[in-house]
Image: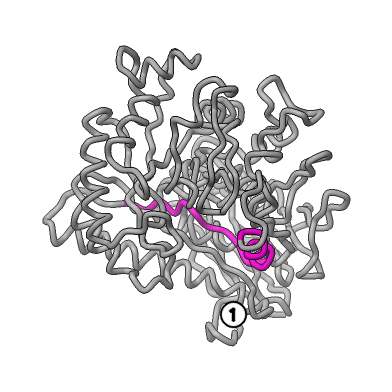
Amino acid sequence: MKNAKMVIDKDFKISRVDHRIYGSFIEHLGRAVYSGIYQPEHPLADENGFRKDVIELVSDLDVSVIRYPGGNFVSNFFWEDSVGPVENRKPRLELAWRSLEPNTFGLDEFSRWASKVNADTMMAVNLGTRGTKDACNLLEYCNYPSGTKYSNMRIGNGKKEPYNIKLWCLGNEMDGEWQVGQKTMTEYGRLAAETAKAMKLIDPEIELVSCGSSYMEMPTFPQWEATTLELDYDYVDYISLHQYYGNLNNDSSDYLAYSDDMDKFIKSVIAACDFVKAKKRGRKTINLSFDEWNVWFHSKDEEEDITKNHPWQVAPPLLEDHYNFEDALMVGLMLITLLKNADRVKIACLAQLVNVIAPIMTEPDGKAWRQTIYYPFLHASKYGRGIVLQPLVDSPKHTTLEHGEVSDIVSIAVYNEEEESITIFAVNRNIIEDIILDIDIRSMDKFSLKEHIVLHHDNLKAENTAKQEQVYPVKTEVVKVEHGKLEVNLKKASWNVLRFKISK
């Protein structure tokens, strides 16, 4: 059997985890809102029409921040249509996904729902078909106390106190040809700069996210980052990254190597940010908001058929990927990659949260249930808070078709000072062989292993459904612990969470 070695020391620090790295995303897309988080006619709906079973599953994930209302949707979003008495709201054609938006759920409802799941809001403004004026009006509605047109509108709609939203996205994927209101890099950079400048005059405490390239393979990447940041550097705080992966070639070994590409993507964006900082002789460091990331490929054909051949439906079943076990491994690898870069990645949003490429699915007339990818996010969110430590890992390798030689073991450690605990997240992405991992944590004085949680299934294609959960975490025994070292078996193709209690 192959062996790997790991050394962990509390002095090998990367950064403290920003809790917003465990964010997610609700867009007016498919069934994310209607029959997802909001379904007044459902037996488990509360007085607001919110599904209580969904609230429970989201609350368990402890999602820190939720991006809203898009996504591509935001580039033709008229926020005024989504507030005020529901009986006065009018339906609108939704151009991004060729759906019919009834506007029975909007900004005010979302804010109430977000408070139910104890999450902050990451609000996006429409820089596709609108611009600076409307972004400022929306900010005034949300954050200004009273006495102005839009703050009084909010109060008249039943919300006396401001929403006090402090994190804002300046548009979405503005270099994408699919985007309503696509911009050149210079057009966007100028618009973002002027919008950011105006918004910070209204509320100097807000943080703003400038749009990066839509994904790593865009022909505009990374020149888009360099050009737009040169124009809006003085006014923004973060730049966005979006990336999705899928096993399109049905090559599981190569699929699980895509997390290495994600790491390269992050480091490339960091380089672009630091280039602009150096060129402008700036003091401010632009950090990263990875506000769309996930696996997305299972539902592409259905999505294309609905949007092309059956448009203008209310909440059609779009982007409803049904995830299998290897997708859960990929999500775990992506979470580890985010933690490895916690010194610069301060915000991240699993896209999305309910029904649409989501860890949670709902039956319109039935239950809400957990997809396979629910569990790695749950574990990282629960146990991945604190200071990220850089483990020294000596791992065997295996060969993949497109990525060449890659390490069997991908791992990271997080030290929680308050709880005096350390958690190791590790994926064995060798789909053929178990790996014996020798862990050396003698520098931690006395320690005890609290638990070893494993997500594993012999069938990489195993899925969960509303009727049966095939993929779920279990606790297992450690092989051997002595003299500050322990030996643990990491099963082939497995997600592992090792939790240690440190004793002084």
Q: Is residue 285 magenta?
A: no
Using the image as rendered, state which of residue 17 and residue 234 is in the foreground. 234
The answer to whether one can see residue 156 in this image is yes
Report the residue at 24% width, 54% height from top.
189
Where does the magenta region start and end? 287-307
Report the residue at 41% width, 63% height from top.
176
Q: Is residue 296 magenta?
A: yes
Q: Which residue, given by chain and number where applicable, does mark 1 sit on?
A: 396
Is 295 on the left-hand or right-hand side of 435?
left
Residue 281 in the image: x percent, y percent? 11, 56
Is 256 on the left-hand or right-hand side of 365?
left
Residue 278's quadrant in the figure? bottom left
Residue 328 in the image: x percent, y percent? 67, 60
Residue 143 in the image: x percent, y percent? 36, 24
Scheme of colours in the image:
one colour
Q: Residues within 10 Å of mark 1 (few under 14, many from 20)?
A: some
Residue 275 in the image: x percent, y percent? 21, 64
Using the image as rendered, state which of residue 390 and residue 48 is in the foreground. 48
Residue 93's quadrant in the figure? top right
Report the residue at 36% width, 66% height from top.
267
Using the image as rendered, state which of residue 7 and residue 241 is in the foreground. 241
Most extreme residue toward the right, as rendered? Answer: 467
Tally of numbered discs: 1
The quarter of the picture where the C terminus appears is top right
The quarter of the picture where the N terminus appears is bottom right
Callout 1, which amino acid?
Pro
> Height in image: 404 above or below 484?
below
> Height in image: 203 above or below 396?
above
Report the residue at 54% width, 64% height from top.
244
The answer to whether one can see residue 344 in this image is no
> Height in image: 176 above or below 233?
below
- Which type of secondary structure does the marked residue at label 1 adopt? loop
